[in-house]
Amino acid sequence: MRFKSFLFVIIASIFFTSCKVIQPSLMLKTEKDFQFSKFSDSLILENYKIAPNDEISLRVFANDGFKLIDITTQSTGTIARNTIDEIVDQSGMIKLPLIGKVKLSGMTLRQAQSFLEKEYESQYIKPFIQLRIINKRVIIFPGTVGAARVVNLVNNNTTLFEAVAMAGGISTDGKAYRIKLIRRPSPEDKPEVFLIDLSTIDGIKAGNTTVLANDIIYVEPRARFGQRVLQEITPYLSIITTSLTLFLLLK
């Protein structure tokens, strides 16, 4: 009778322990009644917007692009020193030569270029601005433990499809029908979480969504309950087998 009680305690411990650690690596969980952000056409067509920690590469031309300006020395010519690289701070501001601090966060590249052209009108005749962001990146979890990647975005309007492809695609353990796109427009904003299904041809529209700086693309991993339960209970089975052997020998 005592052995049966002992055996029951061990089996119960196996069950409850396994439930708690069945998916210890699962991240970014959402409750069953979690309200995902509404997916809209405007999200798909949204252009890349400058964000804090973006590194901006700036070039200035005079006379609508006719002559390149070296803004580090306020001279003109075709030398390579005319490019200025600066980082957007956490408040969305960036410090530039001659015009000082300006806020660019939240602007598209086209909006920022038009804004800076007006700012530089006091310094140059018909200024023409070229802007590039040289450190755009997103974080991608493709659905397999240890396969996460930080992907640098070369194109200004990289799509979700392109970003996932750069990370090697969705892994065999990933759920293509449960992809979370997590976006935080600014440090003060609450993160938006969009649930995207790329498992069918209907997902093409969502897959062409433009990803923004610091987006998190999380492919929910498929649960391998049988394999994980077996991994968890194997040490306990060894204990039970040893205990049963000792009990039979002593009996």
Image (spheres, helix red, strand yellow):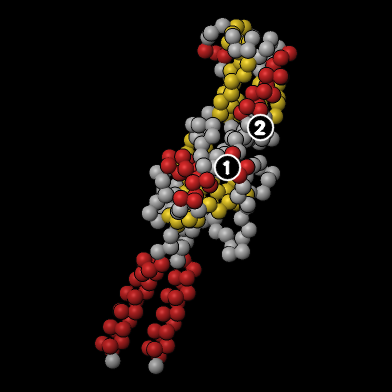
Q: Which image quarter holds the C terminus?
A: bottom left
Q: For the view shown, which residue lies furthest in the front direction?
A: 202
Q: Within the image, what quadrant is residue 235 found in? A: bottom left
Is 65 located above or below residue 229 in the figure?
A: above
Q: For the view shown, which residue lies furthest in the left direction?
A: 249
Horizontal side of residue 200 vs 42, given as left or right: left
Can residue 145 be seen here? The reply is: no
Q: Check disc 1 and report its element: helix, strand or loop.
A: helix
Q: In the image, what residue occupies the spot 66% across and 14% down?
A: 127
Q: Nearer the viewer, residue 54 or 49?
A: 49
Horizontal side of residue 125 vs 56, given as left or right: right
Q: Which residue is mark 2?
A: 107
Q: Tag 2 or tag 1, which sits nearer the N-term?
A: 1
Q: Amino acid at mark 1?
A: Ile
Q: In the image, what residue occupies the spot 28% across and 88% down?
A: 248
Q: Amino acid at mark 2?
A: Met
Q: Which residue is mark 1?
A: 44
Is 60 located above or below residue 191 in the figure?
A: above
Can residue 55 be seen here? The reply is: yes
Is 248 located above or below residue 214 in the figure?
A: below
* Spot occupied by residue 45 in the image (x, y as percentages of width and height): 59, 39
Horizontal side of residue 142 vs 209, given as left or right: left
Q: Which image quarter holds the N terminus?
A: bottom left
Nearer to us: label 1 or label 2: 1
Q: In the image, what residue occupies the spot 67% across and 23% down?
A: 114
* Spot occupied by residue 7 in the image (x, y as percentages of width and height): 39, 84
* Spot occupied by residue 25 in the image (x, y as percentages of width and height): 47, 58
